[in-house]
Image: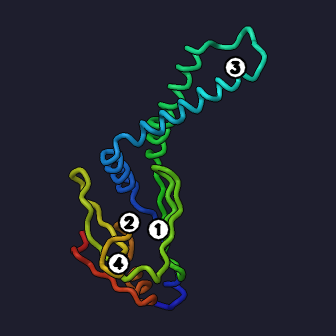
Amino acid sequence: MDSHATEKLQWHEPAAYRRACARRRSQEQPWERLKVAACIALGLLALYAYMVFTQPPQPNRPGWLVATVISAAGGFCSGYVFPWLILLMPNSIVILSPKGVNNNIIGYGARIRFWDWRGISGCRIGTDDIAGQSFRIIALLDGDGRELERFGLRADLDLQQVRSLLESHGKSLVVEDAPA
């Protein structure tokens, strides 16, 4: 395998794994969505209050009850409905590049994260059991052997390519389980 082939490797994490991770996070932090919903609802209500107190009176302006119901519905949609809809099509790309490991996520939020090779001592392949489902994962390890992050592995990902790329950066790969 030539060095150009292992310069960069990327894969999409399995959607089922991303959804399971989001469900686990929701169970671990049950108040997170409620906080988002409440903040959005209060923000919409504050916007309405600003409009009421800074604009001249209008005969067709809805009352406070209608504004409160609309704000609560907007908060509920923002905190519960939209995240649920986004999880129907989660997208997470893991990229092993010459500079480090990059993870671009659209799903339970949108994030771009990066780990420089200098902060990674190696990787471990194992399993992550979430709500009775078992997923194959690769975990980034720091110098003390602690997990920095874990990513879902696709079944068709060539582990030899992963190993070659990691070794080209002086990193080890430990496989804890046999491939399914």
Q: Residue at x 30, y 74 (%)?
A: 125
Query: Can you tell which of label 1 and label 3 is closer to the viewer?
Result: 3
Q: Residues within 10 Å of mark 2 (few under 14, many from 20)?
A: many
Looking at the image, do the residues carrying marks 2 and 1 touch, with CB atoms under 8 Å apart? yes
Q: Which residue is mark 3?
A: 52
Front one among 38 and 111: 38
Residue sitting nearer the eye, 139 or 92? 139
Residue type at numbered disc 3: Val
Left or right: 61, with 87 as reference point? right
Q: Nearer the viewer, residue 138 or 27?
A: 27
Say whether residue 47 is left or right of residue 131. right
Q: Is residue 131 above or below residue 48?
A: below
Answer few, some or many: residues within 10 Å of disc 1's Cα (few below 14, many 20 plus, some between 14 and 19).
Answer: many
Cα separation, mark 2 vs mark 1, equals 8 Å
Q: Tell me which colouring the rendered structure shows.
A: rainbow
What residue sits right under mark 1 in the picture? 94
| Helix, strand or loop at mark 4 | strand
Please tell me the numbered disc located at residue 36.
none
What number is the disc on residue 151?
A: 2
Q: CA distance from mark 2 to mark 4?
A: 11 Å
Residue 107: where, in percent of width, then height?
47, 51
Q: Which residue is mark 4?
A: 123
Residue type at numbered disc 1? Val
Residue type pointed to by label 4: Cys
Q: Is residue 43 left or right of residue 14?
A: right
